[in-house]
Structure formats: structure tokens, C-alpha cells
């Protein structure tokens, strides 16, 4: 018997595949990250039983409680941190997450690097870029990215593998296309200009209301909450 979450998961994956094909890409090149902010553990378990393995949380301490209650299922899943991360939470974030998508300053990058080395792991990170230079959003400006990457090159405890962005809110997905395109172009230009090694591969962009547009413009990770788990409190940004 299909549940609401399993049905939603199937539908979202179908939409991802169609968007990838419209963009001339393979559906398997786009990963679905299920955003579990405010989602109860029972619903997360239901998503796992339906085949979902990649999840994202916005708050470190909320994630710690959820992941502890998951038991062995935690080791069958992959978790990204997708909220604003304070440096005093960096150590716990390194312990809990496989990737931090929201690195937006060198002090945070160095803290994650230090704690990752102490934990004997190499943490994947994305650099958050404020492509629209929206004062309400976090992230480096596009012009700051080359300097950041040059100075972060010495940090061996983190693997800078991509970029992420959260564009200004707009109910019309087509209005956001220029911002998604800008992030893709910034990644490609950065790889060409800096010869970043390893090159920036990932683009985390697009949420429930606009992920198809983001995929058409090159997203490799889309962060989906409401379209999977239904409308819930504090669902903005998912």
C-alpha cells in the first residue's frame, strides 16, 4: 500500500527526470535531498522505507535529537546541513553530517577543517553564494569566491565540492531562472579560471516551488521539503 510520502516521492522523482531531460541531462545526475526541518521521525522513517537516502536539516541540535532516535537507520542515510551554521556548532556539525552546504566565510571553513581533522574525516562542503546579493540572505558575493577558494586551498580536512544558493523569494519560478543560471556560470568560470582541483562539481539550488527550473539550469542537488512531506510550519526555504 502506497503512503502519501511514497506517492509524493515518486511524483517528485518523475518531475526531476523530466526537468533533467529538458535540460539535456541524465536524470541520475540530479540528487533529491529531502528537507526534514520540523518533520517528525516517523515521516523520515517512511521516506527511508520508500527508498530515500539523502536528507537535509537546518538546525544542528534538532538534527542531533532526530538522528539519535533513528538508530541503525542513521548509517543507511546521508545527511547534509543546509541551515546557517554558527562556528560554535561546527564540531557537532562535523560529527553529525556528511556535508555542510552553507559555508560562507573562512572562519567557519577553518573551524570545520580543524574539527574534521580531529575526527579523522574529510567533510564535504559547498560554498554558499549570494548570487542576487540579497541583504536578507547569507553567502559570499560572486566576486569573493576566487579569493575564498585560494585561501581555503590549504584546508585538507574539507572537500570543497560545489556551490549552493538561495535566491530571493518569488512565487514565479521563471523569475528565478537568471539566478540559477548565474550560479552555474560562476561555477564553470571558476573551474576554468582557477583550475580548482578537484573541480567544483555540485550545484545545490532549487526547492519545492522552483526545483524544475533549477534543474534545467544545471542543479545537481535539489532541496525538497513541502512537495514530499506536505505543508508544515516554518516551511519557507524548503
Image (cartoon, helix red, strand yellow):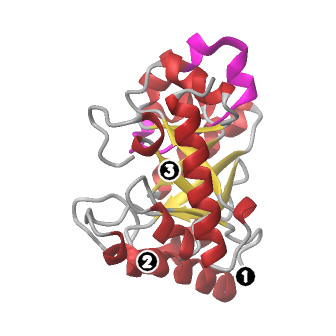
For image coordinates 59% across by 73% down, the residue present is 218
Q: Nearer the viewer, residue 222 or 22?
A: 22
Q: Earlier in the sequence, mark 1 or mark 3?
A: 1
Q: Earlier in the sequence, mark 2 or mark 3?
A: 2
Disc 1 crowd rating (10 Å Cα; few below 14, some 14-19, many 20+) is few
For image coordinates 72% across by 63% down, the residue present is 29
Disc 2 crowd rating (10 Å Cα; few below 14, some 14-19, many 20+) is some
Say whether residue 110 is left or right of residue 128. right
Q: Which residues are magenta?
A: 67-88
Helix, strand or loop status at disc 2: helix
- Which residue has dot 3 on it? 223
Residue 221 visible: no
Helix, strand or loop status at disc 3: strand
For image coordinates 46% across by 29% down, the residue present is 60
**Disc 1 + disc 2, Cβ < 8 Å:** no
- Which residue has dot 1 on it? 195
Does the magenta portion include 121? no
Helix, strand or loop status at disc 1: loop
Q: CA distance from mark 1 to mark 3?
A: 28 Å
Which labelled disc corresponds to residue 142?
2
**Disc 2 + disc 3, Cβ < 8 Å:** no
For image coordinates 60% across by 86% down, the residue present is 189
Measured from the top left, where is residue 209 in percent x and y? 37, 57
Q: Is residue 208 above or below residue 196?
A: above
Q: CA distance from mark 2 to mark 3?
A: 22 Å
Q: Is residue 218 above or below residue 238?
A: below
Q: Nearer the viewer, residue 131 or 30?
A: 30
Q: Nearer the viewer's eye, disc 2 or disc 3?
A: 3
Amino acid at each position: 500500500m502506497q503512503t502519501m510520502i511514497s506517492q509524493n516521492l515518486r511524483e517528485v522523482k518523475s518531475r526531476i527526470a523530466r526537468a533533467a531531460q529538458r535540460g539535456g541531462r541524465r536524470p541520475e545526475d540530479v540528487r533529491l535531498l529531502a528537507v526534514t526541518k520540523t518533520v517528525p521521525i516517523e515521516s523520515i522513517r517512511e521516506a527511508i522505507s520508500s527508498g530515500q537516502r539523502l536528507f537535509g536539516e537546518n538546525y544542528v541540535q534538532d538534527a542531533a535529537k532526530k538522528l539519535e532516535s533513528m538508530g541503525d537507520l542513521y548509517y543507511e542515510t546521508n545527511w547534509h546541513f543546509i541551515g546557517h551554521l554558527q562556528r560554535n556548532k561546527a564540531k557537532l556539525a562535523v560529527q553529525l553530517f556528511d556535508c555542510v552546504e552553507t559555508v560562507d566565510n573562512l572562519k567557519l571553513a577553518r573551524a570545520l577543517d580543524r574539527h574534521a581533522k580531529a575526527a579523522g574525516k574529510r567533510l564535504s562542503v559547498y560554498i554558499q553564494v549570494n548570487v542576487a546579493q540579497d541583504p536578507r540572505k547569507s553567502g559570499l558575493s560572486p566576486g569573493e569566491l576566487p579569493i575564498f577558494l585560494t585561501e581555503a586551498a590549504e584546508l585538507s580536512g574539507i572537500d570543497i565540492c560545489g556551490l549552493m544558493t538561495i535566491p530571493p523569494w518569488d512565487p514565479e519560478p521563471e523569475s528565478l531562472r537568471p539566478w540559477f543560471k548565474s550560479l552555474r556560470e560562476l561555477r564553470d568560470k571558476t573551474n576554468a579560471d582557477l583550475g580548482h582541483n578537484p573541480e567544483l562539481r555540485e550545484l545545490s539550488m532549487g526547492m519545492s516551488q522552483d526545483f524544475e527550473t533549477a534543474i534545467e539550469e544545471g542543479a545537481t542537488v535539489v532541496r525538497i521539503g513541502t512537495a514530499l512531506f506536505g505543508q508544515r510550519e516554518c516551511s519557507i526555504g524548503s
